[in-house]
Image (spheres, rainbow, N blue to C red):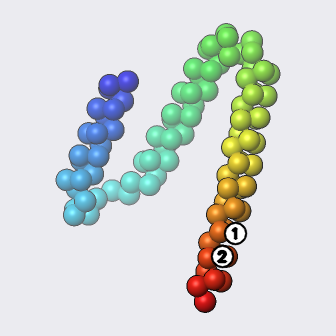
């Protein structure tokens, strides 16, 4: 865990130092490549874990319920916030 945090802080430091410089190579394709590589490695890890494979149905169902609940909660609170902000705006006019 400390290694991950150290790498993240190192990247922040390098980005801070290079913020005024023009990066000579295109960073977007490199980032995309690394994301694909990380996703592939995550798939390999999941495929090698017998506990996850044995309980894939239960874990997938729980993940679906959690995801849908998070989306529904976000939509509800966004709607409530939108109603509050638009009613405040109408009262101020």
Q: Secondary structure at mark 2?
A: helix
Q: Place residue 24 in its image quadrant.
A: bottom left
Question: Separation of disc 2 and disc 1 at Cα?
Answer: 5 Å
Residue 61 position (above or below residue 34): above
Q: Which mark is residue 83?
A: 1
Q: Which mark is residue 93?
A: none
Front residue of this view, candidates 2 and 72: 72
Residue 23 on image: x %, y %: 28, 59
Task: Tell how many labels.
Answer: 2
Q: Place residue 56 in its image quadrant.
A: top right
Q: Place residue 64 in its image quadrant.
A: top right
Residue 12 position (above or below residue 75): above
Residue 67 on image: x %, y %: 71, 39
Residue 29 position (above or below residue 3): below
Residue where numbered disc 2 is placed: 86
Front residue of this view, candidates 59 and 83: 83
Q: Residue at x 74, y 49 (%)?
A: 72
Q: Residues within 10 Å of mark 2 (few under 14, many from 20)?
A: few
Residue found at the very far front of the displayed protein: 91
Q: Residue at x 62, y 76 (%)?
A: 88
**Labels 2 & 1 near each other (Cβ < 8 A):** yes
Residue found at the very far bottom of the displayed protein: 93
């Amino acid at each position: 865990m400390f290694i991950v945090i150290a790498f993240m802080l190192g990247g922040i430091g390098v980005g801070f130092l290079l913020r005024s410089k023009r990066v000579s190579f295109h960073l977007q394709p490199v980032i995309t490549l690394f994301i694909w590589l990380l996703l592939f490695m995550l798939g390999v890890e999941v495929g090698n874990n017998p506990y996850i494979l044995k309980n894939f149905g239960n874990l997938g169902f729980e993940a679906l319920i959690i995801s849908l609940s998070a989306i529904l909660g976000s939509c509800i609170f966004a709607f409530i916030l939108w109603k509050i902000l638009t009613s405040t705006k109408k009262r101020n006019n």
